[in-house]
Image (spheres, helix red, strand yellow):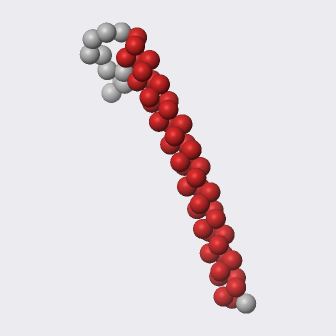
């Protein structure tokens, strides 16, 4: 009984980790697209060597 519970617990943990990693990939993709859009719009906004980020 205990090994069965351990296997089920392991499967639950791996499923949860897989879901979290998939969600993190989607978030990273959205951030990348937002970063690229900001880069493109700031570059098209003005000439010269202005930085589009604040730091």
**Residue most toward the top?**
46
- Relative to 24, is 3 above or below? below
Whether residue 51 sits left or right of residue 14 in the image: it is left
Instruction: Please give the name of the residue rendered at 36% of the width and 21% of the height, measured from the top-left corner.
Output: 52
Residue 49, percent from left and from top: 26, 16
Residue 1, by quadrant, is bottom right
Whether residue 42 sits left or right of residue 13 in the image: it is left
Instruction: Please give the name of the residue rendered at 50% of the width and 32% of the height, measured from the top-left corner.
Output: 33
Q: Quadrant of the C terminus?
A: top left
Instruction: Please give the name of the residue rendered at 27% of the width and 11% of the height, measured from the top-left corner.
Output: 48
Residue 51, by quadrant, is top left
Whether residue 52 sits left or right of residue 37 in the image: it is left
Residue 22, percent from left and from top: 58, 52
How many numbered marks does the figure carry?
0
Instruction: Please give the name of the residue rendered at 69% of the width and 88% of the height, measured from the top-left corner.
Output: 2
Residue 8, percent from left and from top: 69, 77
**Residue most toward the bottom?**
1
Residue 44, by quadrant, is top left
Residue 24, percent from left and from top: 54, 49
- Relative to 32, is 50 above or below? above
- Relative to 23, is 34 above or below? above
- Relative to 13, is 4 above or below? below
């Amino acid at each position: 009984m205990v090994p069965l519970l351990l296997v089920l617990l392991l499967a639950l943990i791996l499923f949860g980790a897989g879901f979290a990693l998939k969600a993190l990939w989607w978030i990273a993709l959205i951030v990348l697209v937002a970063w690229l859009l900001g880069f493109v719009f700031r570059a098209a906004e003005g000439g010269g060597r202005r930085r589009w980020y604040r730091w």
